[in-house]
Each structure stands twice: as C-alpha cells, then as structure tokens.
Amino acid sequence: MPNKIDSNETGLRIVEEQSLGVLLGTSGDIYYPAEPNSYSDFGGGISTVARNPINEGRQRRKGVVTDLEASGGFQMDLTQKNFLRLAQGYFYADWREKMTTASLWDTGITITAATTGPNTYTAAAGLDGFQVGELVFASGFTNSGNNGLKTVTAVAAATLTVSETLTAEGSPPAAAKLETVGFVCDSDDVDVSVVDNLPKLTSTTTDFTDLNLIPGEWVYIGGDTALSMFANAENNGLARVYSVTATELKFDKTEDTMVIEASSGGREIRIFLGHVLKNEATTALVTRRTFQLERTLGEDGVGVMSEYLVGAGCNEASINVPQADKVVVDVSFVATDNEQRTGTVGIKTGTRPAIVPETAFNTSSDFSRIKMGLVDAADSNVTPLFAYLSEMTLTIANNITPDKAVAVLGAFDVSTGTFEVGGSVTAYFADITAVQAVRNNSDVTIDFAMVKDNAGLLFDIPLLSLGNARLQVEQDQSIKLPLELGGAESANNHTLLLMEFAYLPTVAE
C-alpha cells in the first residue's frame, strides 16, 4: 500500500447511463475523458445521527448512518469539442445535427476508403444522406490531403464523390469522419433583398429547405474567395434564421446591416452551417440524460482505485469569460449514489478512448462577436448597449433535487425543476440606454461567438430582461455597469441556443 496518492495520479471520465443508475455493463459503455482544472464537493457526504439517551454517565452512544448526499462538479477549459456531449444533459435535448458519419450518440458510418479517379470516400452504406453541392469537412484520415473542406459532386449509398483531389487510403482510422458544414449555391443564383425591414436571400434554383435549417439557428454567409461571398461586405457574416422556404431564407439578426444586392460575375455564394442544440419546448423532443462520473484515485498496490457518482443529473453549468484569460466552464451534478472500488475490484467495464488534444478559447482574440442590444423587429443589426465588457458569465440551471425515501440510502431518483438561463456582465459604461432598459423592463437579446482554427461555437439568448444596473463610479477608473441577465422563452420557443460550427472560413475569425 502506498504512503499517499498525488492529485496528478487521478483521472476523470464520464459515461452516459442507459437508464437511471444503470449501465450496459459491457464494452458498449464509453467512458469519455475529461480534463478538470479543479473539483467541487465531489463524492458522497454521509450524515449520521448520534444516540443520546438519558444516562448517569452523561455520554452519547455511537450514531447511525441516516443519509447520503451524492453530488459533485468540476471546472474545465472550454474547447471546441469538450462540452458538446455534456451540453445535451444540461439542455435536456439532442443535438440537431447536420449530416455526419459520426454522430454524438450512435455508432455512425464507418469510412472504408478514400479513392482517386474519381475522388471518392466509400462506406458500406449511408453516404446518400449527403447532397450534391454540400461542403463536407473531412477529418481523422491518415493522409492529410483527405482531410479538410470538400465539395460534393455526386452521391450514392456507398460512395461520396468530391471535386477536390484525394490520396488513395485503403483503411482509414476509425476516427475518420465526414460531416456537412455548408453549401455552395449555384452561380449568380442567390441575391439579397430587404422586405418588411428584414433581409433575406432569394434564389431561383437553390432550394433553401435542403439546408435543414430551423428558425432561430445561425448560418455564416460567404467564403474565403471573392466569388464565394457577396460583393458588399455588409451581406457576409453571421446571420440568424427567421424563416425558410424553398426560394427565400430570411434573417432577423445579422452581423451588419444587409443591403440589396444582385449576384453577378459568376458568384457561387457559400453558406456555412452548424449543429444546433436548444432547450426544447415539446415533450417528444425533451431528452433526460443521466451520467456516471468515474474518478480514478491512483493504485493501491493491487490495481487502480476509483469512485463513481451514479445516477448523476446535470444541474448547473456556468460559462465564465474573464478578461485577458481563457474561457472556463464550471459544471455540477446531483447524483443518486456514490460508489468506491478498490484496486482489487478495479474500474468498471467499458471502452476508454484516449483524449484528443485541443486548445482552449481565450477571451482576448477568439471572440469574433459579442453583442447585447434591444430586440428590434425593424432592425436585424441590433444596436449594442455597450462597446466593451470586462467580464461575463452565462449560467444554465436545471434546479435538480434528489428524491429521498424510507429504506433508501441516498436517493431513488432526481427531480428536475425550471430550466433557467441567466448570468451577468460587467460593461464599460458609455450610454444611459442600458440603465433605462433595466427600468423599462425592455426586451433584450445577447449572443456571442468564439472562432478558432476554422471552427467555432455560438451562444444565443434571444430574449432576456436586465437587472441591477447600479453604476460603479470609482476615482481614476472607468465607469462600470454591472448587469444581471434573466433569459425567457423566445418566439422560437427556446431560451438558449448553442451552435457548433465544425468548420468556418478563415474570414470568420
């Protein structure tokens, strides 16, 4: 037995349960690695009650165990991928994914080869879910030329043909993946118009319903070459979908004030797409997930010791954005039980993939957009309430409580409360409008996007109210304006929407 165990000998992995407290118990259980910076109250807190009978010795008798509170949490840096699976647990929803060969929640489609003459990716079946004209991002292949952005020219169940040159690769790694990240519109087919104060793209041959868009999600308009974007810079960039028909794609929130433009000169406008996650409003789309958190505790001379949070529901998550730092996420769980296993017993059965190294988003150069302003149906380019902020926190709370019962140590289930989205910002004061918006209980919206290495995340609260707004005036300092955020259900029936763009053009950074 060792004299002690160092913290650097520990590790953390997370597996989704099949039902509350129940795993498959086979290699089908996948324990995904996590990279915690620190922990908060991880484990089970035991409650005891002592016996205190009246006796001439005036002494207590040994107490009995009466309760177990199982909970835990940790902080991690925010990267492009490390919050995606957990986010489903906090949103109580599935990702609405664009076509991909490797979904977050199933075994997916195995890519069997990359070929030349023609340039194709092959699989046993399933590739006909892609469409001609789509931009597909390939990753995980051994040959670098087989990775990156590709344009689909032909589709069949077992083959996907692209216009770019590939390198023959007979047995790609299991991690090889293809996913839809955009669409190339026909030459000079898409124009910009403005009707009823809302900008829209119009088309004759491109069918916008093929893009699999829903109101409330975002797209990025324009690519990295002159002919893949609109001539007017105002018409390129991030835009939020208001409505979709075969010939029209209308927006209610844009990066700039879009202007009327007819495509010319052979422009093939590129529209980049992402995966969508939002809190759902209908029972059929609400998905409750519970997890087990496995923390290994080093070796005891026989094997690896470990402890588990069992039946863990996602309770709170906070995305913290301090100035001149990295973005971090604090997550917490409420569980039904806590288990410990000796090295003799060993860790639970399952597959444990290696961690994929990623870089964290920083708060200095990775924010491509952050805007809070009054909701204005007459202007898609929201007028900001501030120019700069010194810090921001976005919080998600499911208000989970454990369900206790006689004859149960711990909890037999957990109950979910109201889905709450809030947070706070501290802005540099420049205009009284933000203070007035609090008093007037104005409809406010906030969104922010982080882009790094041609990929990005976007968070959008379409409707919120503001609180606090007591100006901080200190000698020789800039005036600061602290604001509390309170999200509410929007016209699209969600409070918070998260988008993952697996690929964005360099111009988006």
Image (spheres, grey):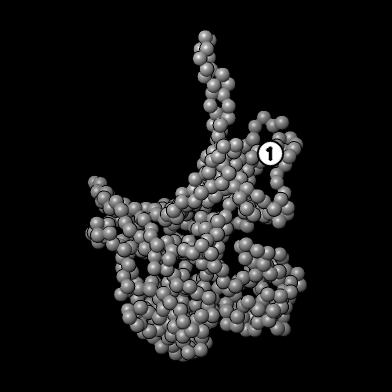
Q: Position of residue 445 (x, y in %)?
A: 36, 63
Query: Closer to the camera, 317 or 18?
Result: 18
Residue at the image point whose x is 49% and y is 48% from the top? 400
Where residue 336 sits, quadrant-wise, is: top right
Q: Name the image quarter holding the N terminus.
A: top right
Classify mark 1: residues with Cα within 10 Å, few (<14), some (14-19) or many (20+).
some
> Relative to the observer, which residue lies in front, 181 or 265?
181
Residue that badge 1 annotates: 341
User: What's the residue type where badge 1 is placed?
Assistant: Arg
Q: Position of residue 108 (x, y in %)?
A: 67, 67
Q: Is residue 349 left or right of residue 399?
A: right
Residue 11 shows in this picture: no
The one of 110 and 370 positioned closer to us in this rendering = 110
- Furthest-front residue in this view: 406
* Closest to the observer, 453 or 500: 500
Percent position of residue 421, x then y? 42, 56
Q: Position of residue 286 (x, y in %)?
A: 52, 61
| Residue in view at x 46 percent, y 51 percent | 417
Relative horizontal placement of residue 109, taking residue 375 as reference (left or right): right
The single residue placed furthest to the top in the displayed view is: 56
Answer above or below: position of 257 versus 18. below
Q: Residue at x 65, y 42 (%)?
A: 296
Q: Residue at x 25, y 46 (%)?
A: 474
Question: In the drawing, does residue 310 fall left or right of residue 172?
Answer: left
Q: Is residue 186 visible?
A: yes
Note whether 326 is above or below 504 in the view shown: above
Q: Secondary structure at mark 1?
A: strand
